[in-house]
Image: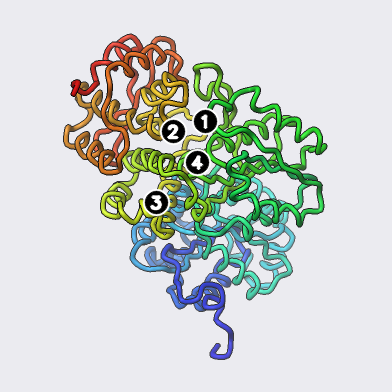
């Protein structure tokens, strides 16, 4: 061991990963073998979950299955796993999970939120070969007892496939040395990534500095063609690395530049994208890349959802707002007259790169406005993020790379968890609209030019908190804290009656409207929000009354 090169030092320098590494995958894919090797190289503890269960129960896994049945074993396994998850912030470690440990999706989402989860894979034939090569090993596997091994493995793999796909990455192990596998696992552990869990459509959001040129080629893969969509402001500033990545493709590639601004986010605005795809001959194996702010990524995603009835797309957001909001969740749309995002589709990207180094060129107004979305996200699900903004405000406004990476990471993590649990906005995901009902109406009432989206959300947050106070949901101290922070960030925080009156007439266009009511989001505390149905007539009546007194 003394003469073996240290993989962790080679890959990371001396930066140990803060989050624990969990290895998942089917039996005999090498989780324990590779896990021990990775832990050895990293100099961190290794835990085999099956060993932990056996030690606690005083029984082998086979005995537990035979004496108590699979449900009892799963309960013990879940208890042991929750103990590890509860201690995940104490020290880095490597954990090899049982093949069925994360069958419960809620538990899997919890693991994705707080760990780096890597799935090891192998073909059914290779799995059986490995088991047969280990004398007595097949008899130790209760789920393979009294069954044709290859057929049984294939059956179980099919039922668990979606679960294994919800991970930070997967590593194929057939025909590879354990050193090679360990090196790839370590590389995945190093990435500053958040997973949006959506079964076979799961993807990662990569966050850091100077990532596009190094990460985009891997996300592109080997498409038949690639269309870069950007706008005339962003492409001259940040198009170089993306175009360099496209130059290495075998398939044809080109770019389309859109006019910047929300006013161009329309059905007519999509035409250049479709024309570019047609001219390129882009087929279903092609890919679109959206390089720009939320307008560009929304339009690129919607074009991808509808071109050839659906092609891959990759998001490369270049504004703080698009990184913390539009980058996650696959909500793609264009505006239709006064109705914001009225025409769209849910269409997940195949990957997202949040390169915070590009934020240096964002305008001060746009950057500050985006902080309202960060505050909203903190209110929904991360009290530490709100404290971080308050305590590190100066560094954040200087656009320090480390603090930006942390803010984007935390924001994306909150949204990814919610989207993973509610991809189509059937319930929990609606909480992400905190501040948006009245905020969108204010934005629309100003013709999408008087206020930026972030400024409209800032005012929408104040309105939502004040309405929450009126209806007994929100404590006054929370309203004061958020309003004060918005003021410190030099964001709009005073509500004018005239603007609210104009906005109130547009509330009927809100996408969350159901007949004569709208699902409104109320904040009870930092990290504790819920929704309640509010009649549109009452909301329209109350909205102007939320205004500040005239000066």
Asked if the residues shown at circle 3 and circle 4 are in contact, with their CB atoms under 8 angstroms apart, the answer is no
For label 2, the SS is: helix
User: Which dot marks residue 424?
Assistant: 1
**How far is mark 3 from mark 2, CA to CA?**
20 Å
- The residue at the point 75 percent across, 44 percent down is 254
Give the mark nearest the N terminus, 4 or 2.
4
Query: Above or below — where is 147 with respect to 498?
Result: below
For label 3, the SS is: helix
**From the viewer's perspective, is the residue at label 1 or at label 4 nearer?**
4
Q: Which residue is mark 2?
A: 429
Residue 467 in the figure: left or right of residue 453:
left
Give the mark nearest the N terminus, 3 or 1.
3
Q: Position of residue 436 (x, y in %)?
A: 39, 28
- The residue at the point 24 percent across, 20 percent down is 546
Q: How is the image coloured?
A: rainbow
Q: Which residue is mark 4?
A: 322
Give the mark nearest the N terminus, 1 or 4.
4
**How far is mark 1 from mark 4, CA to CA?**
19 Å
Asked if the residues shown at circle 1 and circle 4 are in contact, with their CB atoms under 8 angstroms apart, the answer is no
């Amino acid at each position: 061991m003394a003469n073996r090169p240290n993989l962790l030092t080679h890959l990371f320098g001396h930066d140990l990963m803060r989050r624990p590494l969990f290895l998942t995958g089917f039996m005999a894919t090498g989780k324990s073998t590779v896990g021990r090797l990775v832990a050895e190289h990293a100099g961190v503890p290794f835990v085999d979950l099956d060993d932990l269960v056996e030690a606690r129960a005083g029984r082998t896994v086979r005995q537990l299955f035979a004496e108590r049945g699979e449900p009892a074993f799963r309960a013990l396994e879940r208890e042991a796993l929750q103990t590890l998850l509860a201690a995940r912030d104490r020290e880095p470690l490597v954990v090899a999970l049982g093949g069925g440990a994360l069958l419960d999706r809620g538990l899997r989402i919890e693991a994705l939120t707080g760990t780096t989860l890597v799935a090891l894979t192998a073909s059914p034939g290779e799995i059986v070969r490995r088991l047969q090569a280990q004398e007595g090993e097949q008899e130790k596997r209760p789920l393979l007892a009294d069954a044709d091994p290859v057929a049984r493995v294939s059956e179980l793999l099919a039922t668990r496939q979606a679960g294994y796909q919800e991970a930070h990455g997967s590593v194929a192990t057939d025909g590879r040395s354990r050193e090679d596998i360990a090196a790839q696992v370590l590389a995945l552990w190093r990435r500053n990534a958040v997973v949006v869990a959506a079964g076979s459509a799961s993807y990662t959001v990569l966050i850091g500095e100077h990532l596009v040129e190094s990460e985009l080629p891997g996300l592109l893969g080997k498409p038949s063609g690639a269309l870069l969509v950007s706008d005339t402001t962003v492409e001259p500033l940040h198009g170089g690395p993306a175009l360099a990545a496209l130059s290495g493709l075998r398939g044809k590639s080109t770019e389309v530049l859109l006019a910047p601004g929300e006013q161009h986010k329309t059905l007519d605005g999509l035409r250049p994208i479709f024309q570019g795809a047609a001219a390129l001959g882009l087929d279903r194996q092609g890919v679109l890349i959206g390089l720009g702010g939320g307008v560009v990524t929304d339009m690129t995603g919607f074009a991808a959802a509808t071109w050839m009835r659906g092609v891959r797309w990759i998001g490369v957001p270049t504004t703080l707002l698009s990184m913390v909001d539009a980058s996650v969740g696959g909500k793609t749309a264009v505006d239709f007259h006064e109705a914001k995002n009225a025409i769209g589709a849910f269409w997940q990207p195949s990957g997202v790169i949040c390169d915070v180094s590009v934020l240096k060129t964002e305008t001060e107004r746009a950057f500050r406005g985006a902080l309202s979305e960060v505050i909203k996200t903190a209110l929904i699900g991360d009290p530490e993020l709100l404290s971080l903004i308050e305590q590190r405000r100066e560094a954040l406004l200087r656009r320090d790379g480390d603090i930006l990476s942390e803010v984007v990471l935390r924001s994306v993590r909150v949204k990814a968890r919610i989207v993973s649990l509610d991809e189509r906005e059937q319930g929990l995901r609606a909480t992400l609209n905190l501040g948006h009902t009245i905020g969108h109406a204010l934005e629309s009432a100003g013709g999408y030019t008087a206020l930026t989206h972030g400024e409209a959300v800032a005012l929408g947050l104040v309105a939502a908190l004040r309405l929450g106070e009126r209806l007994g949901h929100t404590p006054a101290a929370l309203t004061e804290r958020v309003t004060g922070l918005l003021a410190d960030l030099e964001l709009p925080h005073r509500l004018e009656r005239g603007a609210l009156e104009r906005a109130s007439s547009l509330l009927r266009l809100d996408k969350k409207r159901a007949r004569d009511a709208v699902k409104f989001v109320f904040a009870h505390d930092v990290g504790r929000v819920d929704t309640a149905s509010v009649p549109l007539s009452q909301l329209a009546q109350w909205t102007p009354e939320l205004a500040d007194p005239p000066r």
